[in-house]
């Protein structure tokens, strides 16, 4: 019988912020989405205040003032680095791991029964706390769906002990009693729409869902929900998705902090997206064979004139050279740009990505020697940006002021990924 | 050109704290091979020093902090130094640590003997910071090394 564990970081983004900043201890902390729009992460203190996930920041200004809520813009560089460290630790606990999201991973623990999952989970928890200062919860079950539900129980203190909940040791009647107390919407894969439909059918709890005839659910919903129910019964239907394929496309897009009208501003934005993507491309030793550019107005404001357009062009030769890629991207942009619209978002995608080793030289492009020189130039660019911070050295096309850049009012330093962001300690 | 690529290796290896930072090849013995008797050093060509390996024992749990102030100069920790901090090491009496006290990030020597807990400076101009009841002390991590770039 397979056994899965789901390890989930508690209040991950907010915990990363608190980790490096001692002034945030016991303070309510929220992290906001792109453009500082909505609350996407909450510390325990904020959850206790009853502030919901996803609420627009401007709507909770009064509470923020009254309770002294500290808001941060999303510091993805920091969260990604801490997430990688967590995964690195988890990898030493199981050869089979699926990184499900930035703060959740599934581990396959089949064969580790002897250790005792409660104890094993406790060890994982302790190591991540000691090494990284982050709290995690561990849920263990015979299926991924049950592991996720066990994790929920551990987090909400419904079952388990000290942040670890192991369903495999519970008696069937204990499980049933537990499932009586959990709402059906907490089940992995049961979203808001399905929840509403289930409740209309009189299915409110996890136990009711589990005990509903699977065929009925299949005919009323989909094979997906049927599979979920089988998983709730302990029949493992979902395997780990371990393999991370080399990225076949690299995207970079953002919403702007304000509407952008000028072509020049759009060009700067597109150039800087291309340079980010090209850096990733070079990191995985690949070349892109095509590039797509898209721009659009704010589709959430139907009252203003709407326009959106995307265009893909194949490159004469696959490349990872920022200058070449930016050049083509801007050519495409000029083709699709229409004046008179307020643009809300732009993005680029590098496509037809191939390993550099497979590079095919075209007759029309510069010699191999020239290529070697370009490669060194790009390596220099990456090294300098790695050392002095992203964007320190960039093409003039990317612009200097970055008028269009998204709003990030209170971004914490990149404590772990940029020398300029390293936290200062007082020797005083 | 060779100088340039060497410089790049230095930049990539020395200053980027990636978990899997590239090994920094320091060509300490670029052996010139001459015809005739084989160089006795030839067998050692694969030995390269890695500054990451020297300073960072456990990359997953290692973090960097920069120093502000002169209270630790007795331990050769100076203003502007970058400290290597390994969070996986259990802090013990006598170690240099990063400590969070009353909303401040401090670097001090941890004193923990006979019921007395204090954070000591390494500069006579600074008195020890006694941790009394009601004060909150978080020992964040243990300082295992330091480095500095002279900007030359």
Image (tube, helix red, strand yellow):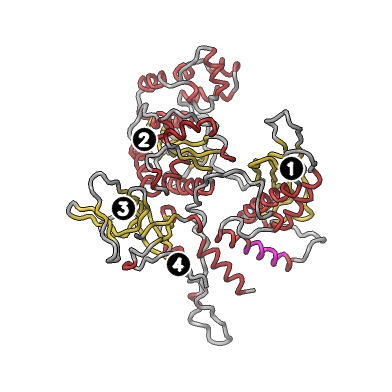
Q: Mark 4 vs mark 2: same chain?
A: no
- Image height of A334 relative to B11, above or below: above
Q: Which residue is the site of mark 2?
A: A163
User: Which of the 4 image quarters holds residue A146?
Assistant: top left
Q: Which residue is the site of mark 1?
A: A261
Q: Mark 3 vs mark 1: same chain?
A: no
Q: x, y percentage for residue A376? A: 65, 65
Q: x, y percentage for residue A252? A: 65, 46
Give the distance between the C-alpha atoms of the residues marked 3 and 1, in whole angstroms: 56 Å
- What's the residue at 36%, 48% (across, down)? B103
User: Which of the 4 image quarters holds residue B126?
Assistant: bottom left
Q: Which mark is residue B148?
A: 4
Q: Which element is circle 1 on?
A: loop
Q: Closer to us: mark 2 or mark 1?
A: 1
Which chain is mark 2 on? A
Q: Is residue A107 visible?
A: no
Q: Closer to us: mark 3 or mark 1?
A: 1
Quick one: A311 or B81, which is closer to the camera? B81
Q: Which residues are magenta?
A: A371-380
Give the main secondary structure, helix, strand or loop, of the magenta stretch: helix
**Residue A130 painted magenta:** no
- Image height of A400 relative to A303, above or below: below
């Amino acid at each position: 019988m397979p056994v899965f564990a789901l390890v989930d970081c508690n209040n991950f983004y907010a915990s990363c912020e608190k980790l490096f900043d001692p002034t945030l201890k016991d303070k309510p902390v929220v992290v906001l989405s792109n453009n500082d729009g909505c609350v996407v992460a909450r510390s325990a203190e904020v959850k206790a205040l009853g502030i919901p996930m996803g609420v627009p920041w401007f709507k909770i200004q009064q509470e923020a003032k009254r309770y002294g809520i500290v808001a941060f813009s999303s510091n993805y560089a920091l969260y990604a680095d801490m997430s990688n460290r967590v995964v690195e630790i988890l990898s030493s606990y199981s050869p089979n791991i699926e990184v499900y999201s930035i703060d959740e991973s599934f581990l396959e623990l089949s064969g580790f029964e002897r250790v005792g999952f409660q104890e094993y989970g406790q060890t994982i928890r302790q190591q991540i706390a000691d090494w990284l200062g982050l709290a995690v919860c561990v849920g263990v079950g015979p299926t991924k769906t049950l592991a996720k539900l066990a994790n929920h129980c551990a987090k909400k203190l419904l079952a388990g002990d000290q942040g670890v909940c192991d369903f495999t040791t519970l008696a069937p009647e204990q499980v049933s009693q537990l499932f009586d107390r959990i709402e059906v919407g907490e089940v992995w894969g049961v979203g808001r729409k399905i929840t509403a439909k289930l409740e209309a059918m009189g299915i409110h709890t996890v136990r009711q869902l589990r005990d509903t005839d699977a065929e009925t659910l299949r005919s009323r919903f989909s094979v997906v929900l049927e599979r979920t129910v089988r998983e709730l019964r302990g029949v493992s239907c979902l395997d780990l998705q371990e393999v991370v394929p080399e990225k076949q496309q690299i995207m970079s897009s953002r919403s702007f902090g304000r509407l952008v009208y000028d072509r020049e501003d759009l060009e700067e934005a597109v150039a800087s997206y291309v340079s980010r993507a090209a850096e990733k491309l070079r990191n995985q030793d690949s070349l892109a064979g095509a590039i797509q550019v898209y721009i659009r107005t704010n589709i959430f404001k139907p009252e203003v004139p709407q326009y959106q357009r995307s265009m893909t062009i194949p490159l004469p030769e696959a490349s990872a050279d920022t200058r070449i890629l930016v050049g083509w991207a801007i050519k495409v942009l000029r083709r699709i740009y229409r004046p008179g619209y307020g643009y809300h978002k732009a993005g680029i995608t590098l496509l037809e990505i191939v390993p550099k080793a497979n590079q095919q030289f075209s007759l029309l492009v510069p010699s191999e020697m020239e290529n070697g020189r370009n490669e060194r130039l790009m390596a220099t660019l990456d090294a300098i940006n790695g050392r002095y911070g992203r964007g320190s050295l960039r093409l003039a096309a990317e612009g200097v002021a970055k008028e269009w850049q998204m709003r990030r009012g209170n971004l914490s330093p990149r404590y772990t990924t940029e020398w300029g962001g390293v936290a200062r300690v007082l020797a005083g | 050109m060779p100088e340039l690529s060497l410089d790049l290796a230095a930049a990539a290896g020395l200053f980027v704290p990636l978990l899997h930072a590239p090994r920094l090849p320091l060509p300490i013995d670029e052996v010139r091979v001459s015809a005739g008797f084989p160089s006795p050093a030839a067998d050692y060509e694969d030995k390269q020093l890695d500054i990451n390996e020297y300073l960072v024992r456990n990359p997953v749990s290692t973090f960097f902090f920069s120093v502000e102030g002169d209270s630790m100069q007795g331990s050769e920790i100076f203003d502007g130094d970058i400290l290597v901090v390994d969070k996986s090491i259990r802090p013990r009496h006598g170690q240099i640590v990063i400590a969070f006290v009353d909303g401040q990030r401090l670097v001090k020597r941890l004193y923990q003997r006979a019921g007395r807990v204090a954070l000591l400076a390494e500069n006579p101009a600074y008195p020890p910071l006694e941790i009394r009841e009601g004060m909150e002390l978080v020992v964040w991590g243990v300082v295992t090394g330091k480095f500095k770039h002279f900007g030359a």
